[in-house]
Image (cartoon, rainbow, N blue to C red):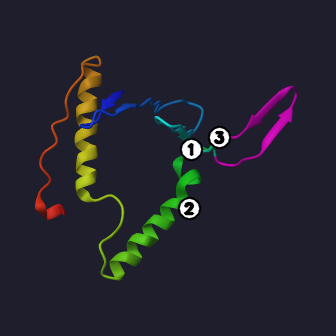
Amino acid sequence: MMLRTKKGICIDVEISQSSGYGYDIQCEVVGDLGTAKLPDPPRVITKTDCTKASGIMPGWETRFIEAYNIEMQDWVDTVLAGETPHGASAWDGYMACLTAYVLGQCREEGGTAKEIALPEKPEFYE
């Protein structure tokens, strides 16, 4: 999918949700001055019978469980300290759901471009 932000930044997102070979995430951000790419998780590479191979994780838990645990512990610690939690908010989740809904409509309509009409953020979420 191709997205364009209000400031005119172009975003190209390619996704395969059912690759059939395992849980494999690739992410590369290309900017005006260079790129940034997520590394593959470290794993053993084997070479046998004229083949070089490495395993691919079966699900998100193996790759992200440590990051998930750190994020959840930070949230708990912040709430217990009476502070405002870090990270995404309920409003961010709503915006993600609204965006996913409009993108689903685009897919069903054969790639027709649509504008995502984002509502004004209520003061309650500030």
Q: Nearer the viewer, mark 2 or mark 3?
A: 2
Q: Is residue 39 above or below residue 47?
A: below
Q: Which numbered disc flags the more N-terminal residue, 3 or 1?
A: 1
Quadrant in which residue 5 is drawn: top left
Instruction: State the separation of the CA atoms marked 3 and 1.
Output: 15 Å
How crowded pointer 2 is (Cα within 10 Å; few <14, some 14-19, many 20+) is rated as few
Tell me residue 119's x, y (percent): 13, 45
- Amino acid type assigned to the residue bearing label 3 in the image: Ile
N-terminal-most mark, 2 or 3: 3
- The residue depicted at 13 percent of the width and 64 percent of the height is 124
Q: Amino acid at mark 2?
A: Glu
Q: Please report whichever mark, 2 or 1, sits nearer to the chain's N-terminal start.
A: 1
Q: Which residue is mark 3?
A: 56
Q: Is residue 11 left or right of residue 119?
A: right
Checking the image for residue 66, the label placed there is: 2
Work out whether 106 lies above or below 86. Answer: above
Q: Was residue 44 drawn as part of the magenta stretch in this picture? A: yes
Q: Which part of the image, by quadrant, shows the C terminus?
A: bottom left
Instruction: Locate the N terminus by quadrant.
Output: top left
First to last magenta residue range:
41-55
Query: Where 119 falls versus 67 (above or below)?
Result: above
Location of residue 58 in the rendering, given as x and y in whole percent from the top left corner? 59, 43
Decide whether residue 59 is among the magenta residues. no
Residue at image point 25% right, 58% down: 90
Q: Residue at x 82, y 28 (%)?
A: 51
Looking at the image, which is closer to me, 49 or 70?
Answer: 70
Q: Secondary structure at mark 3?
A: loop
Residue 39 appearing in the image = yes
Residue 38 badge: 1
Cα distance between the residues tagged 2 and 1 = 16 Å
Q: Amino acid at mark 1?
A: Leu
